[in-house]
Amino acid sequence: MEGKTLTQQEKDINDWLPITKSRNAKWWYSAFHNVTAVVGAGVLGFPYAMSELGWGPGITILFLSWICTFYTAWQMIELHEAAPGKRFDRYYELGQHAFGEKLGLWVVVPQQLMVQVGVSIVYMITGGKSLKKIHDTLCDDCKPIRTTYFIMMFASVHYVLSHLPSLNSITAISLAAAVMSLSYSTIAWVASVRNGVQPNVEYGNRSSTTAGNVFGFFSALGDVAFGYAGHSVILEIQATIPSTPEKPSKGPMWKGMTVAYIIVALCYFPVSVLGYWAFGNSVDDNILISLQKPRWLIATANIFVVIHVIGSYQIYAVAVFDTIESFLVKKMKFKPTWFLRFISRNVYVSLTMFLGITFPFFGGLLGFLGGFVFAPTAYFLPCIIWLMIRKPKRFSLSWHANWFCIVFGVMLMILAPIGALRQIILQAKDYKFYS
């Protein structure tokens, strides 16, 4: 009898947690959730990354990253139901299946949380800076307002949206965000083409010193890795799709992911190549800053960025809420009440807001986080889990593909933070807190 009540209790908790609460998603939900999660505002930094990498390496690394992360996304979708009769609704559950109960948690949770919290902080900053840009673009002679206040304005939206109960309940926001990401990416590359190649544009080395170029190259690797951050929410998105033995969830999820990745390519490649083509080495670390004119278009693009970043923040935040609430209810034995949710979610939004206001050196953070935690979760952790669970034949195509992604991912993980750390140190020298 007790066993039954325990499973019933587990079921009740699962019905309360935001990821597993509602499992009636369609394949197109997964398409726009994935677009919203993957196409970060990081795409606006891609022309800058290209200027650090140069034409050949830049296009190669963009393309390899796209292929590699598309492949690891497929692996994660396949592994969602790797054990018969069980669904791995969260990344760490898959980790526990591969590495064991204890080790699985330690391998996955710190990295996954760093990705999700890192993205939340970066998006707080991006949202705030884009709001400031809208204000400054449309109002030349206004008194300047601190970025701090704009980040607070951006956070105020999340104090409301964060109380939506489940991942499926933010579908409309996510759809709007996905449309916006395609829109502002298109604005960025169309405006670059319209502006044309700038007079005396240069495509050579960006920095005058060898050290500057080498570190810049490393840092740019991290910027690219940051552009493929969606893996830490793939299983969570798939958990919202219904699944039966006849019709497993991987079918619709893979369909959605394929559509999402085509849209990702349409966002990333034109912006990176055409933005770099137009501005060369003088491109800013946010392409919208380089495109000064026409004013209304740049203001519109920034409004789109704000809407997209609101959606992205929510997708990552829901996954964090799920982890926090699981911990509070399952481990700390709190009662699953609305009050618990109200407190924990507001604390999280406040924390990300505070950190965003305190450390807004945006570019350096992107590269550092991108290399340090995004490379593992997106590039090589799925491959290691795949090798452990599926055990492909040695020297088969699958074996080679996995090892290629592992080597590529580890290289990103080691090199990117080195370059980014130097950039953060250089930027932090002339940085005033709470400016």
Image (cartoon, rainbow, N blue to C red):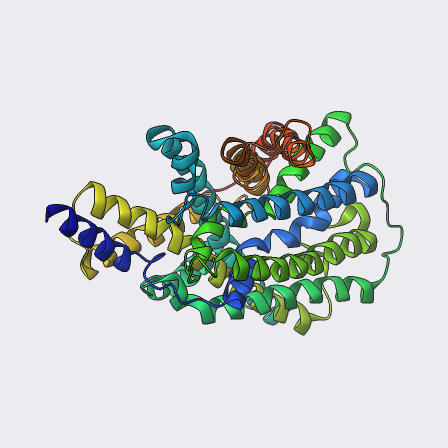
25 left or right of 323? Answer: right
Q: Pick out the residue farthest to the front.
A: 246
Q: Is residue 413 above or below residue 234?
A: above
The picture places residue 423, in percent across and down from the top left corner, at: 61, 34
The picture places residue 71, in percent across and down from the top left corner, at: 63, 45
Q: Is residue 143 visible?
A: no
Q: Pick out the residue farthest to the left.
A: 1
* Residue at x-position 79% and y-position 45%: 281
Q: Is residue 32 above or below residue 48?
A: below
Hey, which quadrant is residue 58 in on the image? Answer: top right
* Nearer to me, 133 or 95: 95
* Residue at x-position 71% and y-position 34%: 217
Q: Is residue 200 visible?
A: yes
Q: How many marks?
A: 0
* Nearer to me, 367 or 26: 26
* Residue at x-position 72% and y-position 61%: 291
Hey, which quadrant is residue 137 in on the image? Answer: bottom right
